[in-house]
Amino acid sequence: LAALRENAAKLQAARLTLVQDDGLAWLRHAHDVYDVIFLDPPFQSGLLEKALPLLAAHLSAEGVAYVESGESLIAPEGLQLIRNGRAGKVYYGLLQRL
């Protein structure tokens, strides 16, 4: 979080919101909508499978979610994988609402 705050200050990102919270709890209870979401939970933790189905409700109509995983990504209901690839052992993808 400190690194994100530092980078936000360097970039003078005035319209940036950083949230320090339990990610799954926040996704379940927040009503905020974003243009960009970054999701990179620890691999093999099972968190990605729990978080992905909750993303669509938090993306704006043209918003995207950048996701990293230890295995190939499959878009959950309500989202589509618009770009994906692999770098070494990391699979990455860009998801958008249907």
Image (tube, rainbow, N blue to C red):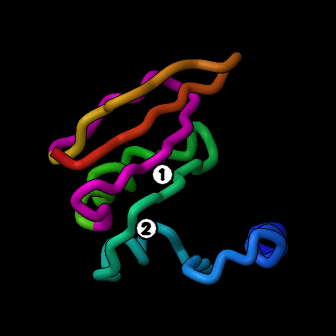
- Looking at the rendered structure, the kind of residue marked 2 is Leu
Residue at which label 1 appears? 47
Circles 2 and 1, Cβ within 8 Å, touching? The answer is yes
User: Which residue is at 28% across, 54% downward?
Assistant: 62
Quarter of the rendering occupied by the C terminus: top left
The residues tagged by marks 2 and 1 sit, at their Cα atoms, a distance apart of 8 Å
Secondary structure beneath dot 2 equals: helix
User: Which residue is at 31% across, 32% downward?
Assistant: 81
User: Which residue is at 66% across, 75% downward?
Assistant: 13
- Looking at the rendered structure, the kind of residue marked 1 is Leu
Q: Residues within 10 Å of mark 1 (few under 14, many from 20)?
A: some
Residue sitting nearer the eye, 5 or 27: 5
Q: Is residue 63 magenta?
A: yes
Where residue 48 sits: x, y (%)?
45, 47
Quarter of the rendering occupied by the N terminus: bottom right
Determine the image quadrant of residue 35.
Answer: bottom left
Residue at which label 2 appears? 24
Against 25, residue 89 (above or below) is above
Name the side, left or right, on which 8 lies relative to 17.
right
The total number of labels drawn is: 2
Where residue 53 sits: x, y (%)?
27, 52
Magenta residues span 58-77
